[in-house]
Image (tube, grey):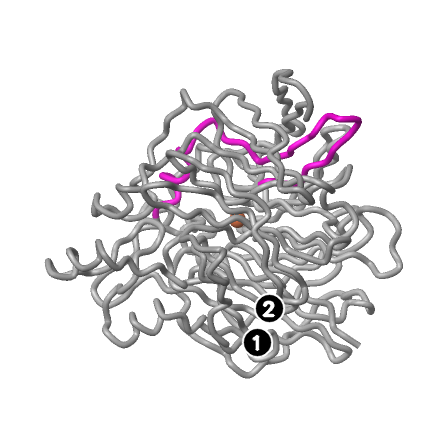
Amino acid sequence: MQDKSSVGYGVGFRSLTREIAEPVALSVAGALPAWLRGTLLRTGPSKFEVGARTYNHWFDGLAMLHRFAFTEGGVTYANRFLKSNAYCAAERTGKISYGEFATDPCRTLFGRVAAIFDPKLTDNCCVNVSDYARAAVAFTETSIPMRISPETLETLGVFGYGAALKGQISTAHTHYDASRRCHYNYIADLGLRSVYRICAIGDDGSERQVAEIPVERPAYMHSFGMSADHLVLTEFPLRVNPIDLRLAGKPFIQNYRWEPARGLVFHVVEKESGRLVRTATTDAAFAFHHVNAFLDGGSLSVDVIVYPDATIIDQLYLARLRSSSPITATGKLTRFQFSLAGKAPVTRRILAELPFELPRINYDQHAGKPYRYVWGAGIKTEGDFLDCIVKVDTETGEAITWHGTNLYPGEPVFVPSPSGRGEDDGVLLSIVLDVGRDHSFLLALDAATLEELARAEAPHAIPFHFHGNYFPATA
Ligand SMILES: [Fe+2]
């Protein structure tokens, strides 16, 4: 019998290379809602070794796609590597061939010189899977999303942006505006003159640049905010001199510098006109994830999971995680508020004390609108990795949790009940790693109470990963 107390979270950062291409039925304990008919698609880093080398950072690993399908007959599971150019080149050559978040490729001296003129952007889409222009698309933080088959997990090719949306860096967290039937994203075009391009991608496949914001030292921005009529680019003071990305010879993120004197800068752009409505600055902070944003009587609220600085990026290097080192940099749900007119200062307020990450909301009904509930993967035990699922009431600051010994849950995806009227009427789907049993299971919770409804045993341990979405079955 394994001594469970000695098992740290670090086992969640081992490689999983086994692929199950044909869906297998999972045994289910408990009862899933009868209305749950669809597919949960997720992506995350799954292979951390190539040849003799190991990637440096959690965000670097080669992407694996996971699929849980819910039918009348039960739940099935399949997983396949994303067959990106980065993956295929690594398989073919036995070498890391594309630069990732914090790892540079193997290069000869000649290759190093050549790379200055021809930097290969990675297409290793290990960050998110969502629908985009009516297709299932996997994302990383470059401008090269990949289309995938939601049925077979086959890699179908690059989701190509048109020439008008030129740029290199982007986000895996697109926003969808149901009333305008389009997704929004930004693409940073870095060079001698750098710009953020905010773009709209229509359900019909159309592409449009909404706005262009010039920037001297671009920020690392993992996500952005959206209210009903505005988009919010939040520039954290983690900044890069674009020339360094070409010439410094360091992995991507190591070219960025923490420059707190720049503060935290919100750029608010009107969706319809593309007009920059306000640029507001406040004290420095860092974040990966925006939660929601909404306008209330001329005052814009922007809710973000806030860290005091960018130390969290350093704490997610692979060697550190694999040794189950304490995570001391934690993020808290924070509301920034400012008026769109005038120059009144930005206020900030922590909405919940329990640290958490990977936030989700009832997006279909509340994206860009006033809302009450946020779900996420939280930290109940100080210093631990994400060890609970949390539901936060943004009005009262109350938090309830679901947790268990040796259990490490991933992002809880909210699936609304088809008959539900309440904001929290639905289920949460999360992949949980049981480090004591070295196995993962899909967990379904009542989103209102966090009571456990069911768990479906996966065929193996699934490494900690990032994001994904539920795709309802089409009639
Ligand atoms: Fe993210």
Type of residue at label 2? Ala
Q: Given the current orientation, which residue lies at the most extreme bottom position?
A: 22
Badge 2 crowding class, 10 Å Cα cut-off, few under 14, some 14 to 19, many 20 or more, is: many
The percent coordinates of residue 31 (x first, y second) are 77, 66
Amino acid of disc 1: Ser
Q: Is residue 11 magenta?
A: no
Residue at 59% across, 55% down = 208
Rendering quarter of residue 229: top right
Quarter of the view holding residue 270 = top right
Disc 2 element: strand
Residue contact at pointers 2 and 1, CB within 8 angstroms: yes
Check mark 2 vs ligand 1: CB closer than 8 Å? yes or no: no
Above or below 3: residue 161: below
- Establish if 266 lies above or below 26: above
Which residue position holds label 2? 136
Q: Residue under label 1, please give it.
A: 149
Between residue 146 and residue 303, name the one nearer to us. 146
Residue 372 lies, in percent from the top left, at 77, 37
Residue 284 against residue 100 in the figure, above or below: above
Q: Is residue 409 visible?
A: no
Asked whether residue 447 appears in the rendered view, the answer is yes
Which residue appears farthest toward the left when viewing the image?
A: 109
Q: Residue at x 56, y 62 (%)?
A: 129
Element type at mark 1? loop
Which region is colored magenta? 290-317
Quarter of the image containing the C terminus?
A: bottom right
Report the quarter where the N terminus lies: bottom left
Q: Nearer the viewer, residue 220 or 31?
A: 220
Q: How many labels sit on residues?
A: 2
Q: CA distance from mark 2 to mark 1?
A: 7 Å
